[in-house]
């Protein structure tokens, strides 16, 4: 499994400058912010499991943009019905990345049932046309950079986070949303 920050850095290397990146709540969003904030990133706050649905809506509303959703295993398990809906709606510009560390890291590292549920298989059975299981940083970056018509599902196993001292974004959630909206309007 990948180190969590190495996985996020690999994702950042794979995204394009005009991609929208949505990060799930908890440590994932905070770590992405710490690695490098940018106007095209949105950090979910208090909406566990909703990043993929929000990403689907954004991908449908803005088909000219590629939308990369960074999900966590606990969050995805919480709202697994979204996988079927995403597959049904089939936004060709959606890349759904699952970082699977088998724990709810930001709430105390309680184990999830992740080892018993093959989410890549679930995505494939639901109808995602492309499912990728990268095992290294370069593979993860390449899978994102080369993602074709989606929705694409990328399942990357990561280690639980050892450093829990992540900064919180200094910008308020509504400011992040306003900034993303403005960035989308200006760069269209």
Image: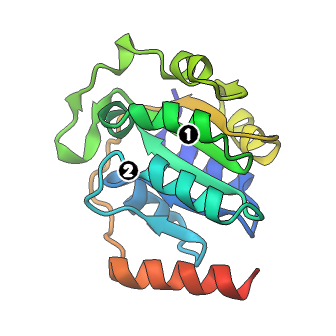
Image disc number at residue 50: 2
25 vs 138: above or below: below
Q: Earlier in the sequence, mark 2 or mark 1?
A: 2
What's the mark number on residue 114? none
Give the percent coordinates (x, y) of residue 71.
46, 44
Identify which residue is drawn at 38% across, 50% down.
Answer: 50
Residue drawn 50% across the image and 30% down it: 84
Q: Quadrant of residue 100?
A: top left
Can you say whether 9 is above or below 162 in the image?
below
- Dot 2 crowding, Cα within 10 Å, few <14, some 14–19, many 20+: many
**How many numbered tags mark residues here?**
2
- View extreme (front): residue: 88
Q: Residue at x 51, y 48 (%)?
A: 70
Residue 160 coordinates in the image, percent (x, y): 35, 35
Q: Is residue 6 left or right of residue 74?
A: right
Element under disc 2? loop
Q: Is residue 38 above or below residue 58?
A: below
> Circle 1 is placed at which residue position?
86
Asked if residue 56 shows in the view, the reply is: yes
Select label 2 or label 1 by which is in front.
1
Q: Nearer the viewer, residue 36 or 183?
A: 183
Q: Between residues 42 and 139, which one lies in front from this camera angle?
A: 42
Binning the other alpha carbons within 10 Å of mark 1 as few (below 14), some (14 to 19) or many (20 upward) gives many
Q: CA distance from mark 2 to mark 1?
A: 12 Å
Q: Residue 169 sits in which quadrant?
A: bottom left
Mark 1 falls on what kind of element?
helix
Residue name at image x 30 percent, y 35 percent = 78
Q: Nearer the viewer, residue 89 or 110?
A: 89
Q: Position of residue 1 (x, y in %)?
A: 51, 26
């Amino acid at each position: 499994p990948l180190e969590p920050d190495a996985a996020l850095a690999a994702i950042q290397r794979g995204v394009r400058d005009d991609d929208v990146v949505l990060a799930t709540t908890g440590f994932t969003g905070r770590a992405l912010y710490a690695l490098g904030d940018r106007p095209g990133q949105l950090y979910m706050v208090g909406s566990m499991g909703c990043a993929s649905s929000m990403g689907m809506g954004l991908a449908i509303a803005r088909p000219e943009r590629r939308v990369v959703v960074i999900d966590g295993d606990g969050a995805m398990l919480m709202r697994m019905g979204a996988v079927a809906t995403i597959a049904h709606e089939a936004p060709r510009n959606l890349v759904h990345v699952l970082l699977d560390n088998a724990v709810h890291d930001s709430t105390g590292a309680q184990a999830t049932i992740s080892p018993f549920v093959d989410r890549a298989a679930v995505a494939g059975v639901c109808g995602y046309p492309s499912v990728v299981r990268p095992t290294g940083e370069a593979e993860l970056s390449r899978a994102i950079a080369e993602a074709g018509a989606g929705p694409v599902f990328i399942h990357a196993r990561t280690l639980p986070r050892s450093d829990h001292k992540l900064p919180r974004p200094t910008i308020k959630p509504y400011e992040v949303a306003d900034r993303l909206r403005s960035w989308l309007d200006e760069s269209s």
